[in-house]
Image (cartoon, rainbow, N blue to C red):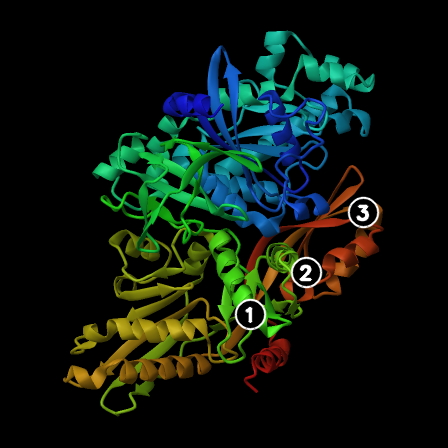
Amino acid sequence: MAEDIVKLMRNRENIRNIGIAAHIDHGKTTMTDNLLSGAGMLSEELAGKQLFTDFDKQEQERGITIYSANVSIVYNYENQNYLINIIDTPGHVDFGADVTRAMRAVDGVIVLVCAVEGVMPQTETVLRQALKERVKPILFINKVDRLIKELKLSPEEMQKRFERYIREVNQLIKKYAEPEYSEKFLVNVKDGSVAFGSAYKNWAISVPYMMKTKITFKDIVKLTDQGKEKELAKLAPLHKVVLDSVIKHLPNPLEAQKYRINKIWTGDEKSEAGKEMVNCDPNGNLAGIITKVVPDPHAGLVSTVRLFSGTLKSGDEVYLIGQHKKERVQQVSIYRGPRRIPINEGLSGNIVGVIGLGDAFSGETICSPENIITPFELIKHIFEPVVTKSIEPKDVKDLPKLIEFLKQVGREDPSLEVKINEETGEYLVSGLGELHINAKVENVLKEKGIEIKSSAPIVVYRETVESVTPHEIEGKSPNKHNKFYIIVEPLEEQVCNAFDSGEIEGEEIDKIKQDTVELFVKNGLKREEAKKILCVYNKNLLINATKGVLYLNETFELLKQAFKDVCDEGPLAKEPCSKIKVKIVDAELHEDAIHRGPAQVIPAVRSAIREAILESKPRILEPLQIIRVDVPEELVGNAMNEIQNRRGQILNVETELGASIIKAKLPVAEMFGFESALKSATKGKGFYSLINVIFEKLPISLQEQVISKIKKRKGLE
């Protein structure tokens, strides 16, 4: 078995690396079961029932996928064997970061849409995540049996519905794909890049398959109505229709790496390493990225690695670029869901499991120590953490175990942020929602037998300004030999939008390239300011607006440090700052470098920026979730009351076929317990999904109260 797979790994034209992604409960794991049964790994009886890739205990209890799971299968298409590396991803928005990381590893994705619910917010999010990584989609419309049996739609009505879903998916592809891919990546019913079926009932159909087998849609309706679904699954097996479409429409690594490398790698494509990756060269130098890290009780850490060039063998020494260290590979394996099969070597263009990289983290670039390459582009998550919980052990002797576990969690899931509050000694864990922290931290600690106390969820606010500082603020160094003059302004709206959309990298840039300057100018920043940017940090800008100040360039690193300190802890309530432009307009510096060291410059600049913010109409920004609520028409009033009682704002209401869709905006601070309140207000029939997370100014009437609460929590009062 393992030898067959290693042979197939060499034939890169016959490899497909694919993800399966969709809104929650649209049938991803059930679909994966079917694909495994087609490869002889699951009996046909169990396909769709076993949920093979949900092998974590929590996943089985909750009935949802929490961790992305890998499995490699061999499939015969037109008398040739193909190696298909599959990643089944979570659908719940709290685990969206797992989807983003999986998209870095794959070249194509099957996007599932439920035939009853249609295109949902998370469908849009997963498509956006895939297209951001230049991953090509195909579409599978699932649960068609429910349209026939429950909704009793005629074939014509079903066709209209399918046309609408395909149109909506293609609109999203046009919206999120780069211009040169928006046409190439569209899905089309005629060529088979769209298929329909029921993963639970194990059947599927596509136009090419209908032409080949002469099965018509009327036959499908008839067999479903007569309850002959097993017969239907034999006539049109799901794995055959879907995997045929995967092989025909999704690219092999040789094709995909030609256009994906310059998107996901920051180095020069024309360099030796760049050419080897573009050509997916197994004889080149090693280059790969770790997209997932999971602890295994028997083997230690297992890293999932997508190899872009070179060959990886057990015993090889590799270099972890982010950690600046070498580690030795103990074992290379391929995934079979919960099991791994050791192999002698992993070749470029494949996804493999690697044991031995003890200090690895998700998103890390690996290469050969003799040929260190530029790292891959950071894996950027679409939503940022907005909910925080404070965690401490009930028993002090468990503290070392807790610290070790939290470090580990940060490596496995970089969208969980772990911080230690130096003053209070608490451990603060920030995630995308309550479920994210609960499933990946609290429950896992419980399983490990570590008893913890965790606080009620804490909302992360931001600090910003509304106006320009009325006059220059002077910051004097403790020795009185250096003076800095600072002004703070709100950042231009268009620049903020460019940060939010990801057009400009907003996290941290210390060296501004010319093309980044042009992006700022295009988005409304004055050219003379854009050319003088010293640092971009957490969507804030530091600009050197001085002219001819002696020795200032020698203090740039210290100025950046002071600026970052204030961005991390603003003056109102020590919350992070956002969308602020800090300008150094003048300075007087001592000629002797010894008198302008860190202890002099940093406090002077830090206090001046804080004072300037306080004089520029400072405001608190609160996180809001834009959500979609689906509810039966007769219960729409109850759902709206629930939203409005929580300072929510209704943005839009649409009604069709007796169901209402409410689009609303709610403060995250008011969202705790919203799901259960909505369920009880709508007799269990209403549910909501997240569309986006944004920050807006907190109503001025609430500002003092919120600042006071934050200060009290942080022990600042």
Q: Secondary structure at mark 2?
A: strand
Foreground tag (1 vs 2): 1
Quick check: 197 above or below 306? above
Res. 192 visible in picture: no
Residue 649: image tag: 2
Mark 1 Cα-neighbour bin, 10 Å: few <14, some 14–19, many ≥20: some
**Location of residue 143 by image quarter:** top right
- Residue nearest the observer in this picture, 608 or 82: 82
What residue type is disc 1 on? Leu
What residue type is disc 2 on? Gln
Quick check: 157 above or below 261? above
Q: Which residue is mark 3?
A: 685
Q: CA distance from mark 1 to mark 2?
A: 43 Å
Q: Which residue is mark 1?
A: 399
Q: Earlier in the sequence, mark 2 or mark 3?
A: 2
Horizontal side, residue 190 vs residue 542: left or right: right
Res. 560 visible in picture: yes
Question: Does the CB distance between marks 2 and 3 fall below 8 Å?
Answer: no
Q: Residue sitting at 71 percent across and 47 percent down? A: 62
Q: CA distance from mark 2 to mark 3?
A: 21 Å
Horizontal side, residue 567 vs residue 529: left or right: right
**Location of residue 28 by image quarter:** top right
Q: Earlier in the sequence, mark 1 or mark 3?
A: 1
- Residue 704: image location, x then y, percent: 60, 81
- Quarter of the picture containing the C terminus is bottom right
Mark 2 Cα-neighbour bin, 10 Å: few <14, some 14–19, many ≥20: some
What residue type is disc 3 on? Lys
- Residue nearest the observer in this picture, 510 or 662: 510
